Image (cartoon, rainbow, N blue to C red):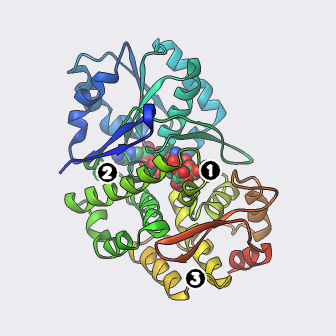
Amino acid sequence: MTVHIPVSLGTRSYGIHVGPGLISEAGKLLKPFAKGPVPIVTDSNVAFLHLDRFIGVLQDEGIEVHPIVLDAGEGTKSFAWLEKLIGQLLAAGVDRGGLIVALGGGVIGDLTGFAAGILKRGIAFAQIPTTLLSQVDSSVGGKTAINVPEGKNLVGVFHQPSIVIADTDVLGTLPRRELLAGYAEVVKTAALGNADYFSWLEKNAVQALNGEPEAIVRAVAEACKMKAGIVARDERESGERALLNLGHTFGHALETATGFSGRLLHGEGVSIGMALAFQLSVKLGLCPAADCERLIAHLKMVGMPSAISDIPGERPSPEVLIAAMAHDKKVKDGKLIFVLARRIGETFVTGDVPVDAVREVLEV
Ligand SMILES: NC(=O)c1ccc[n+]([C@@H]2O[C@H](COP(=O)([O-])OP(=O)(O)OC[C@H]3O[C@@H](n4cnc5c(N)ncnc54)[C@H](O)[C@@H]3O)[C@@H](O)[C@H]2O)c1
Ligand SMILES: O=C(O)C(=O)C[C@@H](O)[C@H](O)[C@H](O)COP(=O)(O)O
Ligand SMILES: [Zn+2]
């Protein structure tokens, strides 16, 4: 049932391996890249659940491993943790020809990828994603970053991994809230450019989210195939890749306004942000209301948040959110940039959005 998806980027090409039980193959898959001591960067939750077995399969191949365990949570994508990680990577003795392994969710992948991208001006790294979000999105494409108080992912580099190994069995230990947050990026991938995939999700989301092997492997592999294609055509986001930001102009502003805290996970921000992007598209007369209703119905059916009022605690004001959006990396010539929809499966990027319309959807 394993699927292999190539990411074609010339000398930076690599493979994504998706399937059940792949951790047991990780030693063999990583061996060709592992030269010298190999730091394994992970977080405390993943270390507790999966690190010992992972170390075992690498040691079985004669790989010398150096586990580095960081705190779990979005707060770890910060300058303070980057500095700590760099210190530990240097202590592990990894050199420029070596390999750094990220074992964990998007936080570990983004932080480790960034550290690998800047340490000694660039060291190879491998992504072993352990959340649904990281398997379908963050482990692929080479965007790495940390957050700063001004906004999400504002400090980072493009640094492609050398290999991605997504073992769908490890999703079995993921808390339901995290699984659903990751599913937002699955829905995003379908909604931005693949109406057939969206229809398939409407029929199969429950099975996939219950961990039925065929359904979850297909859900992950389809998202990876779409992202691999987009990244291969537009690695540095000069065009089409910006579509992967569907829901993120709103979502990142919501994450910033809630302080990158457990109040709102990235995927939850994307879920609400997608609903807002479709509502904005309807308001501007670009998208049929029925498509927006269909998207929101699917989000609700699986139990995902779809409105700002779904966020616990004090509601961030439209002005605070619009101010946060001004720091978005996509801002061009002072204009906010949005991914808007013509229908489910057809989206486009635009800077031509009246701020009053944005304020109105933020008030609902
Ligand atoms: N680089 C990209 O292209 C890209 C794409 C999407 C999102 N992101 C970033 O990814 C981050 C979110 O990633 P995430 O949702 O994976 O969050 P995360 O890395 O914080 O992981 C979520 C939680 O699940 C735990 N966990 C991980 N694997 C587990 C497992 N198998 N079993 C039990 N618990 C497990 C973690 O310890 C953590 O508490 C955000 O910072 C977001 O900006 C980056
Ligand atoms: O890979 C991409 O490109 C994406 O936009 C994927 C997003 O899901 C992800 O959250 C990404 O980190 C956002 O990118 P950013 O450039 O807006 O920080
Ligand atoms: Zn995202």
- Nearest to the eye among marks 2 and 3: give it: 3
At 74% from the left edge and 62% from the top edge, which residue is drawn? 336
Image: 327 above or below 198: above
Q: Is mark 2 within 8 Å of ligand 1?
A: yes
> Decide: marks 2, 3 in contact (CB < 8 A)?
no
Image coords of residue 145 (percent x, y): 59, 39
User: Which residue is denoted by mark 3 in the rendering?
Assistant: 287
Image coords of residue 9 (percent x, y): 45, 39
Disc 2 is placed on an element classified as helix
Which tag, 3 or 1, sits closer to the chain's start?
1
Disc 1 marks a residue whose amino acid type is: Ser
Seen as rendered, the residue at the extreme left is 1
- Nearest to the eye among marks 1 and 2: give it: 1
Q: Is residue 307 visible?
A: no
Q: Which mark is residue 171?
A: 2
At 26% from the left edge and 56% from the top edge, which residue is drawn? 217
- Nearest to the eye among marks 3 and 1: give it: 1
Disc 2 marks a residue whose amino acid type is: Leu
Image coords of residue 227 (percent x, y): 44, 53
Residue in the foreground of this view, choosing between 110 and 192: 192
Disc 3 marks a residue whose amino acid type is: Cys
